[in-house]
Image (tube, rainbow, N blue to C red):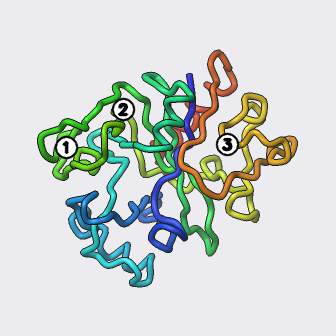
Amino acid sequence: MRIIFSRKGVDSAAGGCASPIVDGRLLSLPIPAPFERSLTTYDDLGLGDLIERQSRGRVRRDALAHADPEFHAGRVAFGQTGAALSHLENQGVGPGDVFLFFGVFDHDGRRDHRIFGWMRIEAILSPADADGPRAPLGGSFAHPHTLAGWGAGNTIYVGPGACGAPPDPALCLTAPGAALTDWRVPGWLRDRGLSYHGAPGRWTPPDRLRAVARGQEFVTDVTGHAAAAFWLENVIERISAG
């Protein structure tokens, strides 16, 4: 089994802000989308006020949003393409593997990387030949990766999952009081390794990792590792807690 730490949502480069915590839950704001990559505005998603407040007006409520991953009725649809997709394929990611979605969140006057959702891959779809926009989960809006123009490598991962984690310290990747990309990680992750983080200097025993500043998908193979499996199930339970 593989765990994929998947960076999603607005940040300083995409949207120019962090996502908020609303009613005790992490609410990941999607990044702005080019006009050909979405049919859905922030207002359509009920996020118009939040994006204008968080971005201090840099992103307008009527701007198009790249609403991906999509969470609906206990299911998730997540699209990927290009170099990030190639990386997932090269790492052997497939059914049974688990995405842990994380992003930048405002909390108590600082910004941290926090895990806000998860998805266990059940099926991998290739929507490149789709006849018009579709909603893989049966929701109200077309998933952006079902629109035309992505190319032959366009892929959508589908499976069970959830979002809206509480601001639980156990779901915070950034170490307390540290810089955004200075992570506190479980010991087994250093033992198993993480893609894009092969340089030994990034790891400081017993539990620190200097995460790369950019990148989307970071993969670790935890096949047969009991401690990693226990950690993952605990994370999934905490996302749904409260």
Which of the numbered marks, if any, corresponds to residue 196?
3
10 Å neighbourhood of mark 1: few (<14), some, or many (≥20)? some
- C-alpha gap between disc 3 and disc 2: 27 Å
**Closer to the camera, 49 or 56?**
56
Residue 156 placement (x, y as % from top left): 33, 37
Which of the numbered marks, if any, corresponds to residue 160?
2
Q: Which of marks 2 and 1 is in front?
A: 1
Question: Which residue is farthest left?
Answer: 131
Q: What residue type is labelled 2?
A: Pro
Q: Earlier in the sequence, mark 3 or mark 1?
A: 1
Q: Earlier in the sequence, mark 3 or mark 2?
A: 2
Q: What residue type is labelled 1?
A: Ala
Mark 1 residue element: loop
Q: Earlier in the sequence, mark 2 or mark 1?
A: 1
For the point 19% across and 52% down, the residue is: 141
Vertical arrangement, residue 143 with respect to residue 237, above or below: below
10 Å neighbourhood of mark 2: few (<14), some, or many (≥20)? some
